[in-house]
Image: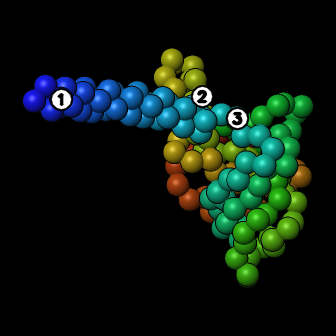
Amino acid sequence: MSHTVGRSLMGGLGNNLSNLRSTSSEITCSSFLSQQQRTFIQMRTVLKVVDNSGAKKVMCIQALKGKKGARLGDTIIASVKEAMPNGKVKKGKVVYGVVVRAAMQRGRCDGSEVKFDDNAVVLVDKQGQPIGTRVFGPVPHELRQKKH
């Protein structure tokens, strides 16, 4: 009889400990994943293209101006990984792009912070003129003031 009582107590205690362990690991995993996603745009980062230039996805090759990584408003060099067949740019072409949405937080002058769910670019030429004629989705007002 005592053997079954001990078993039920251990079973109940074991379940509580396993629940405690799983919730603590879930907290650790979720904070790790959110921290993992909120970093600079660096080499080999895949970004979404949000203009009508014909490219769908690009992979960052280098952040310009000697920086380790790119943030909102920075210019990058990228390689086109996915493209529409009748677009202006083709797959494999090396292009310049301006980061218009970044998952990493960026502070504003008024003390607020802006961050987005995805990383997105608008393709530009070497002079900084956009290749496409339309931009899809939200763009922060800081970029409009910078005349990108």
Q: Which residue is mark 2?
A: 106
Q: CA distance from mark 3 to mark 2?
A: 11 Å
Extreme residue in the bottom direction: 86
Q: Amino acid at mark 1?
A: His
Q: Earlier in the sequence, mark 3 or mark 2?
A: 3
Which residue corresponds to the image point at 51% horizontal and 17% vertical from the top-left?
111
Query: Is the residue 110 above or below the residue 42 in the image?
Result: above
Residue at disc 2, secondary structure = strand
For residue 3, the mark is: 1
Q: Earlier in the sequence, mark 2 or mark 1?
A: 1
Which residue corresponds to the image point at 89% horizontal and 31% vertical from the top-left?
66
x%, y% of residue 32?
55, 32
Q: CA distance from mark 3 to mark 1?
A: 58 Å
Q: Earlier in the sequence, mark 3 or mark 1?
A: 1
Query: Is the residue 71 above or below the residue 125 in the image?
Result: above
Residue at disc 3, secondary structure = loop
- Front: mark 3 or 1: 1
Q: Could you tell me which quadrant the N terminus lies in?
A: top left
Query: Are circles 2 and 1 on residues that touch, CB within 8 Å?
Result: no
31 displayed left or right of 85: left
Q: Which residue is mark 3?
A: 40
Query: Residue 133 occupies which quadrant of the picture?
Result: bottom right
Query: Are circles 3 and 2 on residues that touch, CB within 8 Å?
Result: no
Q: Amino acid at mark 3?
A: Phe
